Image (tube, helix red, strand yellow):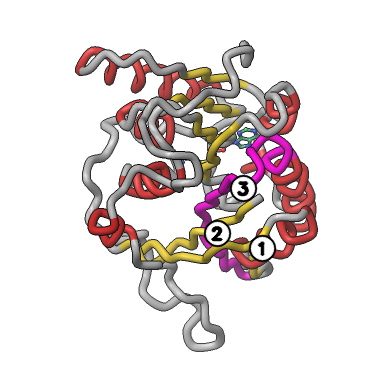
Amino acid sequence: MDFSWLPTKRTCACPDGKLNCLTRAELIKFGSTVIDLKPRQRWREKHGGRFIPQVPEKFIMLFTHPGETVLDPFCGSGTTNVEAKRLKRNSVGIDINPYSTGMTLHRLAELDMLEKSNTMHEIVQGNCVEVMERIPMGSIDLIVTSPPYFDVVDYKSDNPEQWGNIHDYPVFLDKMKLAFEKMHKVVKPGGYVVVVTQDVYKKYAKCPLHADYISICRTIGFEVASTQVYILNYSTGGRLIYGYPKSYYPKNDNEFIDIFKK
Ligand SMILES: C[S@@+](CC[C@H](N)C(=O)[O-])C[C@H]1O[C@@H](n2cnc3c(N)ncnc32)[C@H](O)[C@@H]1O
């Protein structure tokens, strides 16, 4: 892994202090706290918890300029990295699962065939806490990520650092705290960290992930910039009401997007 190219500089002509390259009129598209869109495209191969591209696109356009660098420490199939490249930003992607980093590299290469760009993309297989330790402090302009939704998705990996395999919620949150501490270290002062997640309802565990991430990130020193909602416009499967007639387990039709600022 090589991070000697970090930090990077914007390549646009925007003056210092301008948050993004958008005009006031263009910003209207991103003004709402609700993302309610049909998927623009889906990867052909399956990957648990993959983003629709509009999610990273929104925050990359809002919080960076061309030439700057976006990190996804849980990159999965690489949606953040692909959108970063498409939008002429550099990126770093980390995933514990070699299947995921392989898929990310494949997607970036596919995009290169359509349109060459001279942006940098470092994709590293490993535990994000250890890899972020190697990233220079304050060198990342934006983080857009989606950690495992506790143990809901089986990432088909027996690596002990695969956090999707942790079935003890407090232990999972302790691991996430380590990851957020490293994100706080690598993002630049004033930079944003966008975390997409879903609250998880299980018979024996009610896990309000988005709220617990807010508590953790506050103790680390992040400011909460916004909490947004992404409406899942596709079926998440299952029955409409779980637990009837004794209990209430709602069907998850939304994800949360926690936005933190350093
Ligand atoms: C919800 S998925 C991310 C999906 C991604 N947003 C996409 O669009 O494909 C979470 C990812 O976190 C990875 N992961 C789990 N534990 C990890 C760890 N300790 N370090 C880095 N990645 C990890 C999983 O392998 C999985 O690919």
The Cα–Cα distance between marks 2 and 3, rounded to whole angstroms, is 16 Å
Callout 1 secondary element: helix
Above or below 190: residue 80: above
Of the two numbered discs 1 and 3 on the same chain, state the one appearing first in sequence.
3
The Cα–Cα distance between marks 1 and 3, rounded to whole angstroms, is 17 Å
Q: Counting other residues with Cα less than 10 Å from the Cα at mark 3, is it few (<14), some (14-19), or many (20 or more)?
A: some
- Give the amino acid at mark 2: Asp
- Image point 67% across, 33% down: which residue? 138
- Image point 23% across, 41% down: which residue? 41
**Disc nearest the viewer among 2 and 3:** 3
- Image point 32% across, 58% down: which residue? 30
Of the two numbered discs 2 and 3 on the same chain, state the one appearing first in sequence.
3
Q: Position of residue 248 (x, y in %)?
A: 52, 82
Callout 2 secondary element: strand
Q: Position of residue 207 (x, y in %)?
A: 64, 65
The Cα–Cα distance between marks 2 and 1, rounded to whole angstroms, is 7 Å
- Image point 50% across, 29% down: which residue? 69
- Give the amino acid at mark 1: Ile
Q: Position of residue 59 (x, y in %)?
A: 42, 48
- Mark linked to residue 214: 1
Residue for badge 3:
190
Give the camera-side residue of 244 and 162.
162
Asked whether the residues under the numbered discs 2 and 1 touch, taking CB atoms below 8 Å apart as contact, a structural biologist would say yes
Give the camera-side residue of 53 and 43.
53
- Mark linked to residue 258: 2
| Residue 47 visible in this rendered orientation of the protein | no
Of the two numbered discs 2 and 1 on the same chain, state the one appearing first in sequence.
1
Tell me the magenta residue range.
182-203
Whether the residue carrying mark 3 lies under 8 Å from ligand 1 is answered with no
Q: Quadrant of residue 77?
A: top left
Furthest-front residue in view? 15
Q: Counting other residues with Cα less than 10 Å from the Cα at mark 1, is it few (<14), some (14-19), or many (20 or more)?
A: some
